[in-house]
Amino acid sequence: MSSFRLVGLDPAPFAPLFLLDDAQLAARGMARVFADADHGYPCRVSLEDARRGEELLLLPWMHQAAQSPYRASGPVFVRRAACRRVLSPGEVPPYVGDRLVSLRAYDAAHLMVDAEVCEGREAGAWLEAAFGRGEVAYVHLHNARRGCFSCLAERVGAPADPEG
């Protein structure tokens, strides 16, 4: 049995934002975009790349909301009407596997205890090893080239808590 699973963001906070017009979005530091390719627009809710022509929002997101020196936010894409994806234990989808990823392991106090940059296809092995250490509570994956938050890796059996 695998020790981890990848979890997308909860779509609920994003749904009302799709009702705003472009000026309202811009006033909040957000933008509406339409994918012009089938790769390059990774949705943080569905853990899939948007397909050409799909509508997304590009917006700042507090991905590490814990009261910690590692508190952080950054840009994310979210597709309209995306459903939250919680993958099977050990599953690493193309969304991760096709990218260079940065993995950041945190303990229960939300302090970083380990980190690595690797090809996404190698992320599963690194996550298995990290979760083999009792101190690792969760791991954030980031797309290393752009530095954007990608998704949460949680210990199997732990409740989903994507914002720490």
Image (tube, helix red, strand yellow):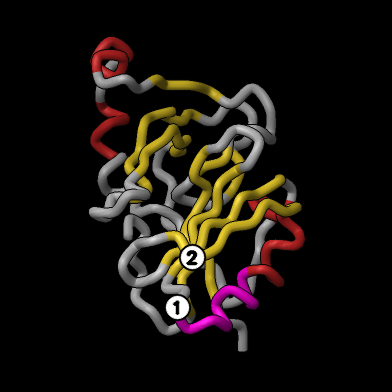
Mainly helix, strand or loop, the magenta region? helix
Decide: is 119 above or below 77: below
Residue furthest to the top:
23
Q: Magenta stretch?
A: 127-134
Instruction: Identify which amino acid the numbered label 2 is placed on.
Output: Val
Q: List x then y, in percent, for residue 154.
A: 46, 70
Query: Residue type at mark 1?
Result: Glu
Binning the other alpha carbons within 10 Å of mark 2 as few (below 14), some (14 to 19) or many (20 upward) gives: some
Q: Residue furthest bottom?
A: 1
Q: Quadrant of the N terminus?
A: bottom right
7 horizontally vs 143: left or right: left
As helix, strand or loop, the secondary structure at mark 2 comes to strand
2 and 1 marks in contact (CB < 8 Å)? yes
Q: Is residue 34 magenta?
A: no
Q: Residues within 10 Å of mark 1 (few under 14, many from 20)?
A: some
**Which mark is drawn over residue 113?**
2
Residue position marked by numbered label 1 in the rendering: 135
Quadrant, the C terminus: bottom left
Is residue 136 visible in the rendered image? The answer is yes
Left or right: 141 as drawn, with respect to 157: right
Front-most of 67 and 27?
67
The CA distance from mark 2 to mark 1 is: 8 Å
In the image, 65 versus 55, the foreground residue is 65
SS for callout 1: loop
Q: Which residue is rendered at x = 64% and y = 56% of the image?
A: 116
